[in-house]
Structure formats: structure tokens, C-alpha cells
Image (cartoon, rainbow, N blue to C red):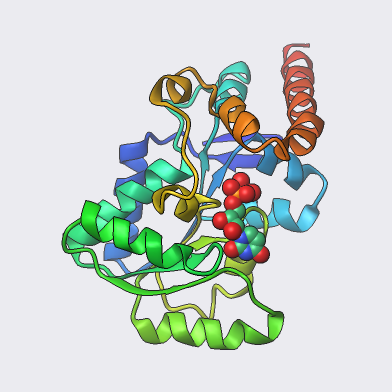
């Protein structure tokens, strides 16, 4: 584990992370997983509740070229990027193999269902216990939680975007009976085919952020205001550590 701007980031590989989650699921231990990119780490710098939540999570994985770079720069390289979308697939495979029911919560009306149909084709034997869109009022919380619990799902994937999904999962952790709680951002949009992911070469070159920026230009303001600050903070941290 390495601390990046006070956020404890795991140094497990993808396979080790999946093994860690599998072991905890076998022991019926509730496991809250966060996949953190540079934007999430920067959000936590200005939001003490979010920072505390990340510090309390069972595992925070390095999701994104920025976080992998930062770990290396701070002298504790991580073996690889452990991206939310990739882990989502690994965990669906695990669910199908171990007969654990999953619940898809989030995205626009109908998207979770479309993603579920794709997931069932990709992972034969996978049981989707339920789906529900991610647009709701606070007053619907109890109904949503009851629906998830009565579905018998052991793995809950919440795709509400960061930080909403983490706050929702954390706030309702005690009431939720699923043992895996994980936020997966726009993963249902990708799995359902609503949006596409960067080509593999871009992912390998650490340029997925650039692809997202080209496809979703509304992200520019958010990224432009956080990523350079993240880099500067890491550079400042490493030069302080050297002095
Ligand atoms: N979303 C949702 N409820 C909301 C806001 C967003 O279900 O109140 C969904 C949205 O439809 C999209 C996902 O959350 O599928 C956010 O995707 P994005 O790629 O923007 O995630 P981020 O990168 O912000 O974590």
C-alpha cells in the first residue's frame, strides 16, 4: 500500500485484487472497493468526508495513468493499473464461477438491464438478481435498499459516478446485505454499448483519459482544473521528501 496525497492506494495487481476480494467474499466479510483515479484523489483533497471515506474503504485501487505515475514518482511503484471497468469484468467472471448473484444499480433508465443482458452472454451462468437506474430521490432510498436486499445479491455494483456512488454505498453500508460494494462509474454505459472505451493501445500507453476527453468534451473543464494540480502536488511532495 502506498499513500498518495493521504489516500491509501493498494499495490496489488489486478489478479491479486480479485483474489483478495474472493477470499473476503468466501469469509462473508463486507468489502467496500473504490477504484481511484487522479480526479478522485483530488476531490478528496477538498472534501474531508470523502477523504475519510477513502481511508476507511477496504481497498482503493490505482485506476488511471495519473495514479500509476504518482506511485512511481513517490518511490513505491504499483505493479499495474487496476481499472474499475476491467475489475468489474473480472468480478463478473468470478460471480459466474462461484454462483454469486449480482445487482446492477445505476445509469439512465434501462441501461443497467442492457448491460445485464450483455453480461449474461459474456459470462454464462451469471445470475443478475436485479437492476435499477441511478436516478432517484432521497425518499426512495429505503425502497432501493429493500429491493437490493430482497434480490439476494451478494455483489452490488453501483454506477452513479464519483463521488456519489461512494457516498451512497458508504452511507448505506450497514443496511446493505451484499458483501461486495463497489462503485463503477460509467461501466454500464460501456458494457451496454452506449459508449465506447479507448482502443487497447491507448489504454496501454496510459492515454485513456485523452480518449475520454475527445469523446466527452464536457469533461475538459473538470480535468483541466484537477489534473495539472494533481501533478504539481505530487511533484511538490516528492521534492519535499528528497529534502
Ligand atoms: N449516474 C446515475 N445517477 C446520477 C448521476 C449519474 O446513475 O445521479 C450515472 C450516469 O448515467 C453514468 C454514470 O453514473 O452512467 C457516471 O458515469 P461517468 O463516466 O461520468 O462516471 P465518473 O467518471 O464520473 O465516475
- Looking at the image, which residue is at 63% across and 85% down? 140
- Looking at the image, which residue is at 38% across and 59% down? 115
User: Is 123 left, or right, of 32 in this rendering?
Assistant: left
- Looking at the image, which residue is at 77% across and 38% down? 222
Horizontal and vertical percent position of residue 200: 39, 25
Q: Is residue 159 above or below residue 67?
A: below
- Number of marks in the image? 0
Q: Which of 21 and 159 is in front in this view?
A: 159
Image quarter of residue 98: bottom left
Q: Which of 80 and 58 is in front in this view?
A: 80
Quadrant the C terminus occupies? top right
| Residue 30 shows in the view | no
Q: In this view, does 161 lie above or below 205?
A: below
Q: Which of 210 and 17 is in front in this view?
A: 210
| Residue 177 shows in the view | yes
Horizontal and vertical percent position of residue 150: 39, 87
Amino acid at each position: 500500500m502506498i499513500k498518495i496525497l493521504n489516500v491509501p492506494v493498494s499495490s496489488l495487481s489486478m489478479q491479486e485484487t480479485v483474489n483478495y476480494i474472493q477470499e473476503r467474499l468466501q469469509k462473508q466479510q463486507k468489502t467496500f472497493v473504490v477504484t481511484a483515479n487522479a480526479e478522485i484523489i483530488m476531490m478528496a483533497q477538498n472534501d474531508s468526508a470523502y477523504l475519510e471515506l477513502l481511508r476507511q474503504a477496504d481497498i482503493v485501487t490505482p485506476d488511471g495513468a495519473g495514479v500509476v505515475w504518482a506511485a512511481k514518482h513517490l518511490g513505491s511503484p504499483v505493479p499495474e493499473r487496476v481499472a474499475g471497468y476491467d475489475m468489474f469484468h473480472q468480478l463478473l467472471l468470478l460471480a459466474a464461477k462461484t454462483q454469486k448473484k449480482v445487482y446492477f444499480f445505476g445509469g439512465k433508465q434501462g441501461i443497467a438491464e442492457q448491460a445485464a443482458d450483455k453480461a449474461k452472454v459474456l459470462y454464462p451462468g451469471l445470475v443478475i438478481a436485479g437492476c435499477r437506474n441511478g436516478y432517484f430521490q432521497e425518499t426512495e432510498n429505503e425502497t432501493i435498499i429493500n429491493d437490493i436486499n430482497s434480490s439476494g445479491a451478494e455483489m452490488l455494483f453501483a454506477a452513479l459516478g464519483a463521488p456519489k456512488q461512494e457516498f451512497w454505498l458508504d452511507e448505506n453500508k450497514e443496511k446493505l446485505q451484499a458483501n461486495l460494494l463497489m462503485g463503477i462509474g460509467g461501466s454500464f454505459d460501456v458494457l451496454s454499448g452506449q459508449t465506447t472505451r479507448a482502443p487497447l493501445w491507448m489504454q496501454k500507453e496510459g492515454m485513456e483519459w485523452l480518449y475520454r476527453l475527445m469523446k466527452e468534451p464536457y469533461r475538459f473543464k473538470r480535468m483541466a482544473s484537477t489534473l495539472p494540480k494533481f501533478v504539481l502536488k505530487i511533484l511538490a511532495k516528492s521534492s519535499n521528501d528528497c529534502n
